[in-house]
Image (cartoon, rainbow, N blue to C red):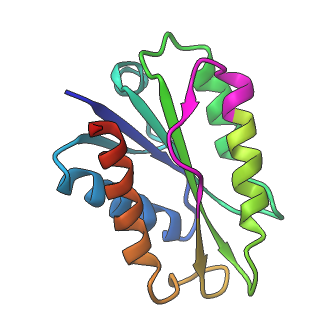
Amino acid sequence: MVKVSLFYDSKYGNTRLAAEKIAEGIRRKGIEVDLADIKEVRLSGAVCADVLVFGAPNHMASPSRAMKRFVEYLAVADLKATGFAVFGTYAGRTRPVDRAMKKLEAIVQMRMPNLKMVLPGLSLRVSGVRGPMMEGEIDRCIEFGGALADHLRA
């Protein structure tokens, strides 16, 4: 059975909520998923996963510093995973987080070159720095999780 480990960094709870909803979408399709805040992660869960998902808030068009350090930390582990996906939250009128997601994708690919990107990154808009998430974004999280699960079951 396929297993997903979903890691997130969240200061105000928006990225955590997104991670929970993505995990919900994955579980609805019958795929096992472990959800973990990177500040409390157990490396053993990551080592056993088939796919790793990373979620971070956008800090000045870049993923959070904590997430970048976490990817570097995880890169030295003996991972079973063969795939990855990323998502992130941002505040603003446009989607500058697309740059942040591209940077996070590039960091993962550089540090863990054996992992293949399963889906393009998901950018989620929040209302102001502290949130809440904008209307419709929760549904997009669940859909992203479902699409990820569908890809893994194919």
Question: Residue at coordinates 59% horizontally, 17% vertically from top-left?
Answer: 114
User: For this view, does 8 lie left or right of residue 148?
Assistant: right
Which quarter of the rendering shows the C terminus?
top left
Q: In the rendered picture of this protein, how many numbered marks are placed on residues?
A: 0
Front-lying residue, 7 or 137: 137
Question: Residue at coordinates 83% horizontally, 64% vertically from top-left?
Answer: 60
Outermost residue on the front side: it is 154
The image quadrant of residue 93 is bottom right
Magenta residue check for 54: no
Question: Residue at coordinates 53% horizontally, 14% vertically from top-left?
Answer: 77
User: For this view, does 10 lie left or right of residue 135?
Assistant: right
User: For this view, does 56 lie left or right of residue 109?
Assistant: left
Query: For the magenta stretch, what is the residue range?
Result: 108-122
Magenta residue check for 112: yes
The location of residue 99, given as percent across then percent down, is 79, 58
Q: Is residue 133 above or below residue 98?
A: below
Question: Residue at coordinates 73% horizontally, 74% vertically from top-left?
Answer: 95
Front-lying residue, 97 or 35: 97
Q: Is residue 119 above or below residue 57?
A: above
The location of residue 5, given as percent across then percent down, is 38, 37
The location of residue 64, given as percent across then percent down, is 71, 52
Which quarter of the rendering shows the N terminus?
top left
The image quadrant of residue 74 is top right
Front-lying residue, 25 or 8: 25
The location of residue 110, given as percent across then percent down, is 74, 26
Outermost residue on the right side: it is 60
